Each structure stands twice: as C-alpha cells, then as structure tokens.
Amino acid sequence: MIISTPEAMFDLGSEVAGKHSLILLRGELGAGKTTFSKGFAKGLGIDPDLVHSPTFTYMNIYEEKMLHIDMYRLEHPQDLLQKGILDAIDEYEYVVIERPKRTEQYADGGRKDILIEKKDDARSITIV
C-alpha cells in the first residue's frame, strides 16, 4: 500500500485502531510512525494532540487506555525490564511500539507488524 500524505497516514492509524491491541511500527526517522500513532489514538477516542513521540521518555500513556513506546534508545535486553516496559505492556489494552526490539516477547494474538518505508514523497506500507 502507498500512502501519499500525512493525513492518509493518520487515517490508516485510525482505521487500524480497535482491530488490533498491539501494533509494532518499524520505519526510519521521519517515516510517519508518530503520525500513525496519533491516528490510532484518535480511533480509540483519545485526543491525538496528546500524542507525542516517546523517543526520549521511552513510553507515554494516553488516558490510561493506550501505551505508546519507542525502543530506539534501548541498547540492552535488560533495559526492557529495568525501565518497566515489559510490565507496562501487560497493563494496557492498546499498545503501539515504535522501532520494536525483542519482538519474540510479545504475544502474536491481536498483534500487527507494520513497516513504513520512505519512497520519495510517499510511504510504502507493509502490514503483516
């Protein structure tokens, strides 16, 4: 699938919301992962303006309903435990993980892996 605008990326996130409880988003910096996450939040009835990239905070919680994680800065597997990320994943109904690591630890049920690749001014989306 090809996405041509940030609005279309937002809409895709909104469409996926509620259908899947765990989203693993892969893509380089600026690919549209957080825009997708904002749309996902909107689809759950959460104000998308509350959603910000958790790159430096590791995880953000929105309205006690959605957990938003960015694993980019995690260097070691034990960081998942030390920062409470694995425990937090089990506590929330909806979880979006940007740049996931150690994916074998996440249940397959209700999970969608989404790859976002930059293609000039568009994005190629692969959903598994």
Image (cartoon, rainbow, N blue to C red):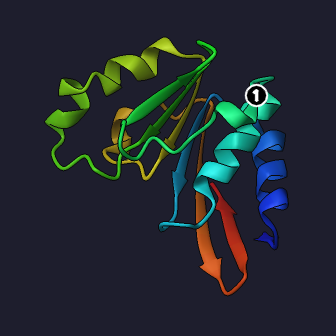
Considering the numbered disc 1 on the image, is that residue within a helix, a strand or a loop?
loop
**What residue lies at 69% left-to-right and 73% top-to-bottom?**
124
Q: Is residue 23 above or below residue 64?
A: below
**Most foreground residue, 63 or 114:** 63
**What residue lies at 33% left-to-right and 26% top-to-bottom?**
85
- Residue reaching furthest to the front: 49
Say which quarter of the image contains residue 118: bottom right
**Most foreground residue, 50 or 102:** 50
**What residue lies at 15% left-to-right and 34% top-to-bottom?**
78
**x%, y% of residue 30?**
55, 67
Which amino acid lies under the numbered mark 1 shown in the image of this protein? Asp
Q: Which residue is mark 1?
A: 47
Say which quarter of the image contains residue 96: top right
Q: Quadrant of the C terminus?
A: bottom right
Q: Is residue 78 above or below residue 55?
A: above
Q: Quadrant of the N terminus?
A: bottom right
